[in-house]
Image (tube, rainbow, N blue to C red):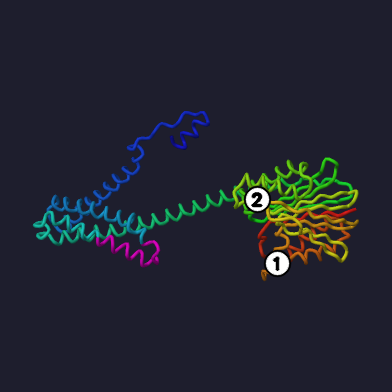
Amino acid sequence: MTSTAVAAAVLGAPPPAPRSDAVSDAPGHRFLLGWTLAWVAVGLAVAAGTSFAANVDFLPVLRLSVLSAVVVGYSAYASARLVSPLLARLPGALRLTLDALIVLAGAVFGSLAVFLTDPFFTLGQLRAVLLILALNAALAAVVAVALGTYDRMRRQIEASYRVLRERDALEREMNVAREVQRELLPRAVPRFEGLDLAGVCRPAIAVGGDYYDYLEHTDGRPGLVIADISGKGVPAALLMASLQASVRSLFHLAADPGQLHARLNDALCRSSSSSRYATAFVADFDPATRRLSYSNAGHLPALIVRGEQTLRCEEGGMPIGLFEGVTYETGALTLAPGDLLALFTDGVTEAPAPDREEFGAARLADLLRGHLDRPLDAILQAVLDALLDWSGPVPPHDDVTLVLARVR
């Protein structure tokens, strides 16, 4: 059953009637019949002109002229459709010259073969025969070159159309990925005791799989997660959706961030191939003790900016999704009021300048320190502006995701 019949069955419509070979080949047969009749007409016209110009009997000239025209016509057709594509890589002038010479050669040898069917008339009326040959050969060369040019233009248009269709399909895929990514990111910033939050994700031209989320324990303690999915496009967006669902379902079951990473790793290993993985950073915050518990699964270390001091959160393990049964460490730090925690993806620190130098974590920490007393939304905008100034005309190579948390 064809795909059209299957689609019709799914939609409840009767499947289309099968097409016979005769019907499906009708356009080709009609073209060949028309082509043959056209060259028969050419032979008639050439015979009439030749018999008048050379003052010879019409019927012998008609027979040879029609046969010669048909042979010449199919020589032109074969050259345009079969030989001309083989010369497509040659320069234009050389290609046209070779096209004409090949058709002329086919026309001459084909016509000679026809004329040898009546050698006595050919030898007796050599002037008329040469006139028929010259007219048919010249006309065949013109037609073959024109048909070959038309075929090349048609193939170029078809190739351009295929490129446009592929580009449209890719654009639709990117739009789907962007929509998935946008729907999975937080729409509002929740309010937690002792902690102010803000986050932003700016997709690049090619959609990636950056993900961040605000979490909450049953006792009201806040949690944060940021992840960077391998790959781009719809596959990365779908893996991001799967990871978000796993994070939200397993968050309340894990005793600490390291255990959460271990469970996420096993779930990802079971649901995807080894080529699909993610780096992630998970953190819990206890407002009563201001204790930050975290686990870093192969992600860029989060930064804690405390006055002139910068702390890096590195405890954890390898990226999730590579090997099942991996364990992850949980690090802990006690924060102080005014401390600024920054979670980010490589779209921030690896943003390239025109000379290919990366923005870097040290420059990010200095920037955060310079705006430490400003509102978090203002700090986010300052970082985005700094990245834009840093990269200049260089297009973004990856999504830019940054989450800030400040202790009250």
Label the magenta part by its dominant secondary structure: helix
Quadrant of the snapshot with the N terminus: top left
Write the start and end of the magenta stretch as one range: 87-105
Residue 297 magenta: no
Badge 2: how crowded within 10 Å, few (<14), some, or many (20+)? many
- Residue at horizontal 88 percent and vertical 64 percent from the top: 307
Q: Nearer the viewer, residue 238 or 29?
A: 238
Number of numbered callouts drawn: 2
Residue 250 marker: none
Q: In the visual, does 115 lie left or right of 224?
A: left
Residue 33: image location, x then y, percent: 28, 44
Q: In the visual, does 298 lie left or right of 63?
A: right
Q: Nearer the viewer, residue 390 or 341?
A: 341
Residue 358 marker: 1
Residue 112: image location, x then y, percent: 17, 59
In the depicted structure, whether residue 386 falls above or below residue 273: below
- Residue at horizontal 47 percent and vertical 36 percent from the top: 4
Q: Is residue 179 visible from the viewing direction of this image?
A: no
Residue 137: image location, x then y, percent: 25, 59
Identify the residue under disc 2: 321
Q: Nearer the viewer, residue 201 or 406?
A: 406
Q: Nearer the viewer, residue 358 or 47?
A: 358
Return the disc, 1 or 2, that comes first in the chain's sequence.
2
